[in-house]
């Protein structure tokens, strides 16, 4: 491709990333208007499925997307993912019942699973030979990602309040059509010279495992007790499908997630750090918002604005990372520094009932700076360490492990919060705390809640400390200058 085509292609990828991040953020702001319009009597009961349907479908497709990129070429898969996402968006906007909307959200999620993961594969192919191993283009990507995180809830609330909730989905259509047209003209990516079989059985098992795991973390302790037959049955199903998936990957001629990738130290450690990062991000975003609303009495619409400092930290690091790279910082250096910074930020987090809100903003700024050193660099580390013919599956695996980390982190931190609150609280659960009137009973509940939240953040700091130790085990040359993994893959590595 010419340099102009590369720039157009990269702009297409940035817009696609915005589509993916906005769709994750803006729907939550419109749940009340959706219920009021489609099913005012029973729609509130279906709201969890409105979110879960997209997440389940998106996670289920991630392993298959990577293999399809390696077999069919990234451009075809990229185009197919966007087209599926747009079809789902159109059907969401036209839905006449909650059932139709949930089904359309699932279809949208099938395409949405590729918006972030396949886009990263495309960006890797767009880099010129001189840019291999560089995060020059990733700087702008981090900037856009941080901005989308900050404005997503605001856009959702704006459309819900001043337009119709259907425009939350319809707004994707003109943007997505422009992306499809530009990619058809500008993207000239290599296809696979040899057609290879696709392990659809393995992909189905991976989808079944990730879906059941997400249901366990979504339902356990909330909709059903952890000891209920439903949750225990889902846990058993997740364990069984995982065992079958691993067995299939050992025997399939073209596995959807080759276990040989885990023989490469950089990939093995990179996947582990990405999963921990997913848990920590969920810990920070989700529980900070709950703390602000429950303990400080801040409205949900205003609480979302407290994520702006974290987005500023993300974008600030995105602007500085290019200069740091020029001074010799490698993907390993960013990974070590990022995990340590995030661990320090979570360890220093103070969530008392009278903690200065400016201190909270400062903590989020520091946390964003830590996340900003990890989000793009972990992908760069994996892409530079993966065998070239497995670039697609290695890149989408990063997103897959982050999704699993999000799910497991939600369940683990939710359990910690509930247990600590039950041990020190006045009775009842955390969900009922916000609805209680003022008084001593409510004050005791808030005190127990802030103690529980503090333990959650300390637990997150411990996890990020573990991630820092894993990052220190990365080879010092990890992620530099696109060092080829196949040579390292054949060498024995320590556990």
Image (cartoon, rainbow, N blue to C red):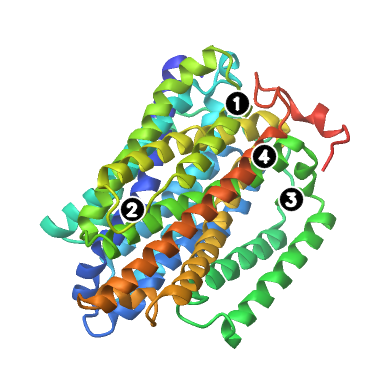
Q: Read off the residue under disc 4.
A: 469
Give the residue displayed 57% in from the left and 45% down from the top.
464
Q: Secondary structure at mark 2?
A: helix
Q: Is residue 484 visible?
A: yes
* Earlier residue among tags 3 and 2: 2
Residue 410 pos. (x, y %): 50, 62
CA distance for labels 3 and 1: 38 Å
Q: Secondary structure at mark 3?
A: loop
* Earlier residue among tags 2 and 4: 2
Q: Read off the residue under disc 1.
A: 333
* Earlier residue among tags 3 and 1: 3
Picture quadrant where residue 162 is located: bottom left
Question: Mark 3 against mark 2, which lies toward the viewer?
Answer: 2
Question: Mark 3 against mark 1, which lies toward the viewer?
Answer: 1
Residue 80 pos. (x, y %): 49, 48
Q: Are marks 2 and 4 in contact (CB under 8 Å)?
A: no
Q: Are marks 3 and 1 in contact (CB under 8 Å)?
A: no
Q: Residues within 10 Å of mark 3 (few under 14, many from 20)?
A: few
For the residue pair 389 and 135, the one nearer the viewer reads as: 135
For the residue pair 11 and 279, the one nearer the viewer reads as: 279
Residue 201 pos. (x, y %): 71, 63
CA distance for labels 3 and 2: 37 Å
Q: Look at the picture and state if 249 lies above or below 448.
A: above
Identify the mark at residue 197; answer none if there is no mark. 3
CA distance for labels 4 and 1: 13 Å
Q: Secondary structure at mark 4?
A: helix
Q: Read off the residue under disc 2.
A: 25
């Amino acid at each position: 491709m010419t340099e102009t085509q590369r720039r157009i292609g990269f702009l297409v990828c940035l817009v696609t990333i915005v589509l993916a991040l906005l769709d994750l953020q803006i729907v939550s702001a419109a749940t009340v208007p959706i219920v009021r319009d489609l099913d005012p009597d029973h729609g509130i009961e279906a709201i969890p499925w409105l979110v879960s349907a997209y997440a389940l479908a998106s996670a289920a497709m991630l392993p298959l997307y990577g293999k399809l990129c390696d077999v069919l070429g990234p451009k075809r898969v990229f185009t197919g993912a966007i087209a599926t996402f747009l079809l789902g968006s159109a059907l969401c906007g036209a839905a006449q019942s909650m059932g139709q909307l949930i089904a359309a959200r699932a279809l949208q999620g099938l395409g949405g699973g590729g918006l972030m993961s396949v886009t990263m594969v495309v960006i890797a192919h767009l880099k010129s030979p001189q840019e291999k191993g560089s995060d020059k283009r990733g700087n702008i990507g981090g900037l856009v990602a941080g901005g989308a995180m900050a404005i997503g809830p605001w856009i959702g609330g704006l459309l819900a309040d001043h337009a119709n909730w259907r425009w939350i989905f319809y707004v994707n259509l003109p943007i997505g059509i422009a992306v499809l047209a530009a990619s058809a003209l500008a993207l000239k990516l290599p296809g696979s010279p040899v057609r290879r079989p696709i392990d659809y059985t393995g992909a189905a098992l991976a989808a079944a495992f990730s879906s059941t795991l997400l249901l366990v973390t979504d339902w356990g302790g909330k909709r059903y007790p952890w000891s209920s037959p439903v949750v225990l049955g889902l846990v058993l199903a997740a364990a069984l499908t995982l065992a079958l998936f691993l067995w299939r990957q050992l025997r399939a001629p073209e596995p959807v997630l080759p276990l040989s990738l885990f023989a490469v130290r950089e990939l093995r450690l990179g996947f582990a750090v990405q999963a921990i990062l997913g848990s920590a991000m969920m810990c920070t975003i989700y529980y900070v918002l709950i703390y602000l609303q429950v303990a400080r009495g801040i409205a949900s619409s205003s609480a979302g604005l407290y994520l702006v400092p974290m987005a500023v930290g993300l974008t600030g690091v995105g602007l500085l990372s290019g200069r740091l790279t020029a001074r010799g910082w490698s993907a390993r250096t960013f990974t070590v520094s990022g995990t340590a910074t995030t661990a320090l930020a979570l360890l220093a987090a103070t969530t008392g009932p009278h903690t200065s809100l400016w201190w909270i903003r400062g903590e989020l700024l520091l946390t964003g700076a830590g996340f900003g050193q990890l989000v793009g660099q972990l992908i760069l580390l994996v892409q530079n360490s993966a065998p070239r013919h497995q670039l697609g599956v290695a890149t989408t695996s990063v997103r897959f492990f982050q999704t699993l980390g999000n799910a497991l982190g939600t369940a683990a931190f939710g359990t910690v919060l509930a247990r600590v609150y039950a041990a020190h609280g006045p009775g009842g659960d955390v969900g009922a705390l916000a609805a209680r009137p003022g008084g001593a009973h409510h004050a005791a509940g808030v005190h127990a809640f802030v103690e529980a939240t503090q333990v959650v953040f300390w637990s997150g700091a411990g996890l990020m400390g573990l991630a820092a130790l894993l990052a220190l085990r990365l080879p010092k040359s990890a992620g530099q200058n696109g060092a080829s993994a196949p040579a390292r893959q054949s060498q024995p590595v320590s556990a």
